[in-house]
Image: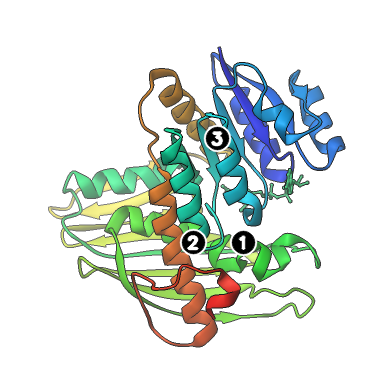
Amino acid sequence: MINVGFLGAGEIAKSHAAAVAQVQGARLAAIYDALPQRAAAIAGQYQAVHCDTLEQLLRFPGLDILYILTPPAVHADQISAAAEAGIPILCEKPLTLSLAEADRAILAARQHGVPLMTGQSHRYHPLASKARELLLEGSLGDIVAAWSHRLTTLAVKPGSWLSQRALGGGLALQYALHDLDWERWLAGEATAVSAQEAHTHPEIDIEDNLWALVQFQNGSSGSVGVSWSCQDAYTERGVIGSRGNLRIINQRRLVGQLAGGKKIDINLGDDYDWEDVFVREARDAIERVRTGQPFAITGEDGRATLELGLAVQKAAMTRRMISLPLLETTSTEAAW
Ligand SMILES: NC(=O)c1ccc[n+]([C@@H]2O[C@H](COP(=O)([O-])OP(=O)(O)OC[C@H]3O[C@@H](n4cnc5c(N)ncnc54)[C@H](O)[C@@H]3O)[C@@H](O)[C@H]2O)c1
């Protein structure tokens, strides 16, 4: 039995708890949150132990993997503490809020020989990974461009960590990070970004619309457009290759056409439940812990996506084109 520990019992913990419960041979064993009633509620639902302190969680006998599910401002310290305790870590995205913190967290994991995974969950979407598979096997030819547009309404609570750029990183490090990560996964590292943001809700400190253009080292282009103020939710991702192209519509259907006229149409159906990505992520992470294989999305990988997100954030805030790699390794606020 693989024993999973949770640090954090907020919204995403509910999704991960339901996902872990679907993985055979694994169980949520122990959970801690700074708000005890939240941890107690999830512990009660999944017959896990509710810990009173972080130390108690980290000393819980036989923990095989720790999910870090807290706001990103505390990730670096918590990764370091879990690394010191010798527990493999799956940390939610963004890995941290600054490159300096990411470096500190990665170093702690390395020094203690602890595997560190970044929870870039969108890579576990079956159609997102199918697009990459088609690209890698050559069916699409060389990548020319990728786009990812996700428009929705999200009621961000004023005063919450999510509503404050210094605590959550804003749309660039929260929502758009998934889109940037998917494009990085397809196209490789970026050389420059430009971006523009709009702020439609003055009661929150962050932008709620963000549009970015990315230049990749291999010459391809990426576009990311995300909105939290769009009444009519809609998502589309796509890839243009030199020998074919595809679109993923509302995360449920992939349609494409390859050179030679071959058509692709994969429909997951209207009932496809997005929570499936967390089940796939849990199965993969737990299997790797069980078999001692390295994680699929490492801390270094999470750092590289964070760097792209920070570049987009900086481009939007300064209205300048930003080159990568970034020179700064200090906090988001101090840098611009
Ligand atoms: N992969 C995804 O699709 C996805 C989706 C949503 C959120 N997330 C990420 O998950 C993380 C958590 O987001 P959320 O929406 O669950 O937030 P949340 O605010 O709902 O939950 C965070 C929890 O952490 C607890 N907490 C805060 N500081 C703590 C500390 N120092 N020690 C112990 N507990 C502490 C809070 O009490 C709260 O219960 C963030 O990094 C976010 O970006 C990822």
Badge 1: residue crowd in 10 Å (few <14, some 14–19, many ≥20): few
Amino acid type for the residue under numbered disc 3:
Glu
In what element is the residue under mark 2?
helix
Please, what secondary structure does the residue beneath circle 3 have?
Answer: helix
Picture disc at residue 131 = none
Camera-side mark, 2 or 3: 3
Residue at coordinates 75% horizontally, 63% vertically from top-left? 155
Farthest residue to the right: give it: 37
Residue 220 place in picture, x, y as percent = 24, 68
Q: What residue is at 50 percent from the left and 48 percent from the top? A: 105
Query: What amino acid type should be assigned to the residue bearing mark 1?
Result: Ala
Q: Contact, CB < 8 Å: mark 1 with mark 2?
A: no
Q: Quadrant location of residue 218?
A: bottom left
Residue on which disc 3 sits: 84
Q: Nearer the viewer, residue 154 or 20?
A: 20
| Residue 55 visible to the viewer | yes
Q: Position of residue 283 (x, y in %)?
A: 48, 26
Using residue 7 as the reference point, say whether residue 312 is left or right of it: left
- The residue shown at (81%, 23%) is 44
Q: Residue at x 70, y 28 (%)?
A: 57
In three-dimensional space, the C-alpha distance between marks 2 and 3, rounded to whole angstroms, equals 19 Å
Of callouts 3 and 1, the N-terminal one: 3
Q: Most extreme residue toward the bottom, as rendered?
A: 319
| Viewer-side residue, 237 vs 15 | 15
Nearer-N-terminus badge (1/2): 2
Whole-percent x, y for residue 194 in the image: 41, 80
Residue tagged by mark 1? Answer: 233
Q: Quarter-wise, where is residue 60 in the image? A: top right
> Does residue 23 appear to the left or right of 5 in the view shown?
left
